[in-house]
Amino acid sequence: DDDEEADVDIRNWEPPHWKFDLFAIGNRNNQWVMDSRAQHWLATRMHRFNSIRGPEGVTMRVYHKRMKYKTKKRKEALIEELYGHWKTPHTFKYLLGKNPGKEELKQAHRRVHAKVNALIAGRGKVSRCGPDVFRMLFERMRRPSAKELWAHEEEATAGPLSLQK
């Protein structure tokens, strides 16, 4: 059983079914939340962006221009593949109402692009100054509250049980 589980490739993850809406309305007005299954599906396909290679022997301006073009085409193909899982052309009318305007529909389609851009954004970037160890320790250490400090100082009054909570 362990060998079979180890052979599962998470890069080809598919949800059990595609009978869900891509977005749902969030807590605030005009805030949409992408379904977690669609997010997971997109995240498992981010490895495709690792294989993008730029041309050799060209200026940096041309190199960056071609890399942007290749990345854009790869994003468009990924989004079309995501939309292809629904039998009918994917619309956002369930969120926008019966008669959405053209600008509203454009904005709705941009939300998927924004999600893909957010997933791609931090890939392969290395910090110039490295991690701030002191900040990481400070954020991870549990800061004591006033009642805990008092309990340690006044253990005879507070009793040992109050320190365990």
Image (cartoon, grey):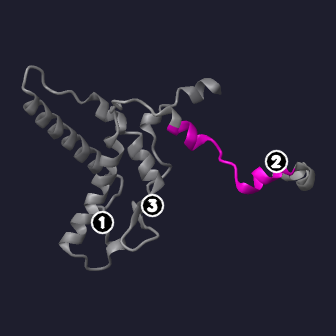
x and y percent of residue 55 in the render? 13, 25
Kind of residue sitting beneath label 3: Phe
Region in magenta: 135-154
How packed mark 3 is, by other alpha carbons closer than 10 Å (few <14, some 14-19, many 20 or more), is: few
In this rendering, the answer to whether 145 lies above or below 124 is: below
Residue at 46 percent across and 40 percent down: it is 13
Per the image, the residue denoted by label 1 is: 91
* Residue 114, numbered circle: none
Residue at 76 percent across and 56 percent down: it is 147
Q: CA distance from mark 3 to mark 1?
A: 13 Å
In this rendering, the answer to whether 109 lies above or below 165 is: below
x and y percent of residue 53 in the render? 21, 27
x and y percent of residue 101 in the render? 21, 75
Marked residue nearer the N-terminal end (3 or 1): 3
Kind of residue sitting beneath label 2: His
Per the image, the residue denoted by label 3 is: 20
Label 2 sits on a secondary structure element that is helix
Q: Nearer the viewer, mark 2 or mark 3?
A: 2
Q: In the image, is residue 112 part of the stretch drawn in magenta?
A: no
Q: CA distance from mark 2 to mark 3?
A: 53 Å
Residue at 26 percent across and 60 percent down: it is 109
Q: In which quadrant of the rendered image does the N terminus lie?
A: top right
x and y percent of residue 127 in the render? 35, 32
Residue at 30 percent across and 79 percent down: it is 98
Q: In the image, is residue 149 part of the stretch drawn in magenta?
A: yes
Per the image, the residue denoted by label 2 is: 152
How packed mark 2 is, by other alpha carbons closer than 10 Å (few <14, some 14-19, many 20 or more), is: some
Q: CA distance from mark 1 to mark 2?
A: 60 Å
Helix, strand or loop: magenta stretch? helix
Marked residue nearer the N-terminal end (1 or 2): 1
Kind of residue sitting beneath label 1: Thr
